[in-house]
Amino acid sequence: DTEVTQTPKHLVMGMTNKKSLKCEQHMGHRAMYWYKQKAKKPPELMFVYSYEKLSINESVPSRFSPECPNSSLLNLHLHALQPEDSALYLCASSQGRGSADEKLFFGSGTQLSVL
Amino acid sequence: RKEVEQDPGPFNVPEGATVAFNCTYSNSASQSFFWYRQDCRKEPKLLMSVYSSGNEDGRFTAQLNRASQYISLLIRDSKLSDSATYLCVVNGNAGGTSYGKLTFGQGTILTVHP
């Protein structure tokens, strides 16, 4: 079982809804990530938080808003999404030491459907 | 050219077979390399890191050739449970934040049949 926990596992939302995805890890990792994965495609990086500060934003539309309340929690706030945003959203964490062989550990993901 | 390219597959092999996957990467400054496996509708899970000296973990052997920018994964004595998508993953060099920028290959689907 993964040590990175994501909720909810499934989410269906309308284009006018506001929802949030949540991610939690208790491995003492200081880097946390959001990835987006479309069917039959590889994961694509969205955001990286390092020591609770946003360090990478891969030009993600503003309808996706990340938040890192503390070193164990990572949220992704969703507003006014489009149907093409439907995908599997994966959270990951890593030690955050910046070493070359930093390994990422993924949560089981939230399968999002936008109607 | 894609940053990370893999054999398109799919590979369909019988139990007990040996199967090899290849991967090439374009960024010569890449620092580290991994193989992840992903089961259908599940998250990617780290299978093994890949080192220049080559490394082995049970039935799995990974090789890295920096000169050719080529990575391989060999699976011996395939099991039904090895059926999954295998993702070649490269950690690019982006200065101090390089540890965050994993680039995934498209993945190779492996199906092991009885």
Image (tube, coloured by chain):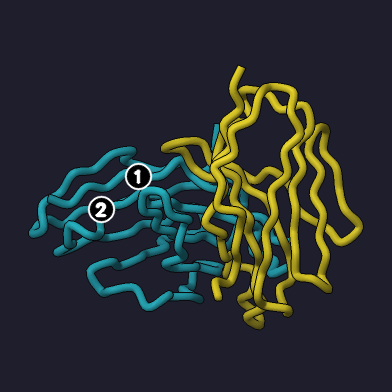
Location of the N terminus of chain B (image quadrant): bottom right
Q: Position of residue A25 (x, y in %)?
A: 52, 47
- List the single residue furthest toward the left: A16
Count of marks overlaid on the render: 2
Q: Is residue A110 above or below residue B101?
A: above
> Chain A colour?
cyan
The CA distance from mark 1 to mark 2 is: 10 Å
Q: Nearer the viewer, residue B70 or B41?
A: B70
Task: Check if mark 1 and mark 2 are on a common chain.
Answer: yes
**Mark 1 surroundings within 10 Å by alpha-carbon count, few (fewer than 14), some (14 through 19), many (20 or more):** many
Residue at horizontal 71 percent and vertical 27 percent from the top: B78
Q: Quadrant of residue A82?
A: bottom left
Read off the chain for label 1. A
In this rendering, the label closer to the viewer, 1 or 2: 2
> Which amino acid is tagged 2?
Ser
Disc 1 target residue? A110
The answer to which of marks 1 and 2 sits earlier in the sequence is 2
The crowding category of the residue bearing disc 2, from other C-alpha atoms within 10 Å (few below 14, some 14 to 19, many at least 20), is: many
Quadrant of image for the C terminus of chain B: top right
Work out whether residue A50 or residue B78 is closer to the camera in this orientation and state it: B78
- Colour seen for chain B: yellow
Q: Which residue is mark 2?
A: A86
Q: Is residue A28 above or below residue B64?
A: above
The image quarter containing residue B6 is: bottom right
Q: Who's the residue at 64% across and 74% down the image?
A: B98
Which type of secondary structure does the marked residue at label 1 adopt? Answer: strand
Instruction: Name the spot of residue B97 as percent of width and height, x first.
Output: 61, 76
Residue at 68% from the left image edge and 24% from the top image edge: B79
The answer for which chain carries disc 2 is A
Quick check: B68 left or right of B86?
A: right
